[in-house]
Image (cartoon, helix red, strand yellow):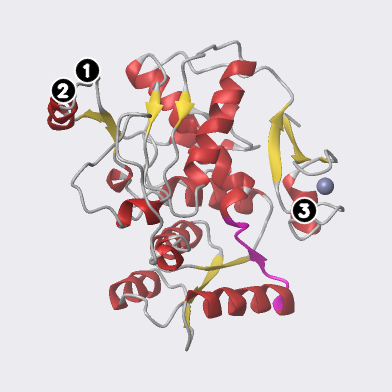
């Protein structure tokens, strides 16, 4: 095996995903937060991608065992865009910088940033012979998982809050996956998904620290190297659950183990709830130069969206 899982709480090693799933995605200490550890030195691919599958291109950097089981709609290798309008805005504020934007809405599966994590999850679940999966979601994750798991031949049940967009329900049902609409909000949908997971023994997506989400999204660090030749010195993202910054930090650590050094890298993490309360039009912030975000009464809505 090229990799193993290690509990972030107690350090215990879980040898593979088969064991992880058998243990109901929990370490014996009760923690559900594990990290993938690669047992061989990581090497960045030298050649250009041969196709549009990021899993094929970064296969040696992912917890995959068989290329034949890769589930892909063509996601994760999207072009980095340079936005000179934001650079001009920054210059007006006395900041000279280059601004690059990684637009995950260009992903080919369902057109959201959930595509890359859903794609890797579908591949690993397919490798493990998993037949059913479930998740509570307000939208993007539900459509993405429904799409990729349908492609993998895996039944996926979406548990949705009562406020879910009808178009989302239609998109999920269109690929042949069931949607259970709760009579309550997102909290109620999550409780129903957890009950379904427990009663039926169906695997459930492990939340923001799910190792499959982290491993896929951490490839943004590698994509910066491939497309820009360097890592960002400042990274900004509107955050709800927060998987992406966690993942990027993991990606940087993996690169450092591979002897890639970038001591200038830092993450300035503003929660999405803070941005939603801003009245100024400032679309971004360099540490120390912008207005401080404030807490928002809408935090409960924005912070729970998945
Ligand atoms: Zn543990």
**Residue indicated by mark 1:** 96
Indicate left or right for 274 with 84 as reference. Answer: right
Q: Is residue 161 visible in the rendered structure shown here? A: yes
* Of the pair 110 and 86, the residue shown nearer to us: 86
The residue at the point 55 percent across, 29 percent down is: 251
Could you tell which of marks 1 and 2 lies nearer the N-terminus? 2
Q: Position of residue 108 (x, y in %)?
A: 32, 47
Quarter where residue 198 is shown: bottom right
Circles 1, 2 touching at the beta carbon (< 8 Å):
yes
Q: Which stretch appears magenta?
A: 200-207
Indicate left or right for 181 with 37 as reference. Answer: left
Indicate left or right for 262 with 22 as reference. Answer: left
State the mark number for residue 165.
Answer: none
* Of the pair 12 and 264, the residue shown nearer to us: 264
The residue at the point 62 percent across, 50 percent down is: 210
Some atom of ligand 1 lies within 8 Å of the CB belonging to the residue at label 3: yes
Spatial CA distance of label 1 from label 3 is 44 Å
**Residue indicated by mark 3:** 31
**Residue indicated by mark 2:** 91
* Of the pair 109 and 264, the residue shown nearer to us: 264
Q: Position of residue 211 (x, y in %)?
A: 63, 45
């Amino acid at each position: 095996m090229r990799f193993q899982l290690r509990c972030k709480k107690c350090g215990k090693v879980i040898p593979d995903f088969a064991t992880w799933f058998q243990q109901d995605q929990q370490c014996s200490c009760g923690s559900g937060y594990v990290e993938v550890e690669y047992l061989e030195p990581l090497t960045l691919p030298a050649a250009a991608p041969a196709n549009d599958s990021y899993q094929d291109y970064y296969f040696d950097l992912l917890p995959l065992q068989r290329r034949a089981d890769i589930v892909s709609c063509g996601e994760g290798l999207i072009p980095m865009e340079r936005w000179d309008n934001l650079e001009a805005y920054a210059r007006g504020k006395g900041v000279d910088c280059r601004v690059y934007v990684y637009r995950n809405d260009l992903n080919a599966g369902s057109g959201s940033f959930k595509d890359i994590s859903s794609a890797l999850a579908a591949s690993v679940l397919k490798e493990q012979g998993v037949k059913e999966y479930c998740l509570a979601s307000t939208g993007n994750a539900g459509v993405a998982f429904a799409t990729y798991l349908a492609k993998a031949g895996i039944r996926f049940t979406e548990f949705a809050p009562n406020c879910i967009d009808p178009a989302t329900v239609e998109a999920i049902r269109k690929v042949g996956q069931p949607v259970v609409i709760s009579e309550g909000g997102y909290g109620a949908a999550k409780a129903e998904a957890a009950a379904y997971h427990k009663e039926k023994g169906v695997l459930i997506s492990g939340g923001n620290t799910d190792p499959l989400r982290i491993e896929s999204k951490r490839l943004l660090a590698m994509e910066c190297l491939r497309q820009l030749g360097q890592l960002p010195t400042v990274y900004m993202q509107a955050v709800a659950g927060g998987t992406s910054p966690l993942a990027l930090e993991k990606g940087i650590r993996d690169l450092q183990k591979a002897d890639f050094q970038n001591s200038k890298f830092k993450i300035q993490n503003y929660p999405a709830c803070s941005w939603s309360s801003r009245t100024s039009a400032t679309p971004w912030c360099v540490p120390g130069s912008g207005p401080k975000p404030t807490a928002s009464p809408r935090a409960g809505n924005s912070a729970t969206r998945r």
